[in-house]
Amino acid sequence: MRQLTQGDCCTSPFWNSDSTEVRFIDQPSPEKPLGIWGVNISGFETAPYLITTRLGTYSPNEQLLAYPDRDKGTAIVERLEDGQQWEINTGANGLFFTPNGQEVLWMQPSSDNPWAEGENTIWLANVDGSNARQVANLQQAEPMDWLADDQLLVVTQSNGSAGKMLLSALSLQDGSQTPLREVARMQDLLLSPSKQWLVYSSFNPNIEENGIWLVDLQNLQEPPQKLPFFGTYRWRDDEHLIFVPFEPNAIQHNFYEYDFLTSQVRLLFAGNTRLLIANNDWQISPDGSKIVLVAAVGTNLNGIWVLEIRE
């Protein structure tokens, strides 16, 4: 267990692609800039350093950064190597990189509420803004994650059944939608690294539909599987979920690993970590070996911590 930052710091920690650096949003002091800061956990340098003052989204290869220009209502894609910038008219909507990092996507809603009546238009363009085009119009629906380079997982409010939502695969090639499964109203959707498994939480008047559920998107004949825990969760790899049980009066948060092939649950850190997670702000490293979290003491933040998972 290692504390990376001290005191009333920081928010939104995330990992670089090779799990050697923790990045986070912070302004260490009034004299220092607000931006994305980092700590290299594999070397001897332990002090946080400024990475960029741009608050945005990295491309999968971390060579590009997309961020909004709120004054113009556009988005900027910047190549970090040389500072080359491209401005894209997104109507003040955020950009998302495709999994291969070659294109960017944004949604133009007809209202502030994507679930309201009306169309939500999906746009796609090259990272330099060229070849911008409409690829789909969604009715009372919202894209949730990538299934492939040219396919999105979309959630639609189901008109036929009260309290139900429809999972579909949206093709960016022709704008067609392939229905996958209708499920009870859901939130906190997370796809596994291989995109085969989907986990989500559900809160419904029908208590039988409440809880955490797992769907096999490659075997849709099988019904969703209810998981034997309730709390927050992250994928470690394609066979394991790490979760923190919901305990409103907890004096520390405990991490567990669930193996859904064997249905076994194990406590990850047998010792007393004495850590409470602030605002569900925690992430697993891409290599699955570590957890980063923002800690809390009462209502105050208590820095960023890294926990190493041991087998």
Image (cartoon, grey):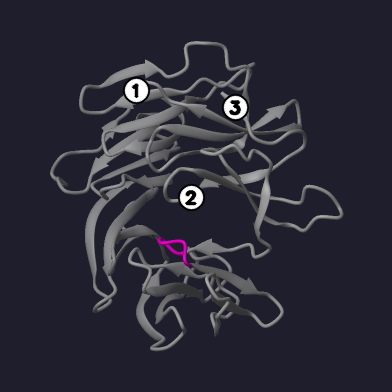
Q: Is residue 186 visible?
A: no
Residue bearing the label numbered 3: 2
Label 3 or label 2, whichever comes before in sequence order: 3
Q: Earlier in the sequence, mark 1 or mark 3?
A: 3
Indicate whether 29 appears above or below 4: below
**Residue 247 appears at what percent x and percent y?**
56, 21
Q: Position of residue 223 (x, y in %)?
A: 20, 38
Read off the magenta span. 59-63
Disc 2 target residue = 16
Cα separation, mark 1 vs mark 3, equals 30 Å
Q: What residue does disc 1 label?
A: 228
Q: Which amino acid is tagged 1?
A: Pro
Task: Point out residue 278 in the picture as x, y percentages from the top left corner.
Answer: 64, 34
Residue 5 point in image, percent of width and height: 69, 36
Disc 3 packing (10 Å; few <14; some 14–19; many ≥20):
few
Cα separation, mark 3 vs mark 2, equals 18 Å
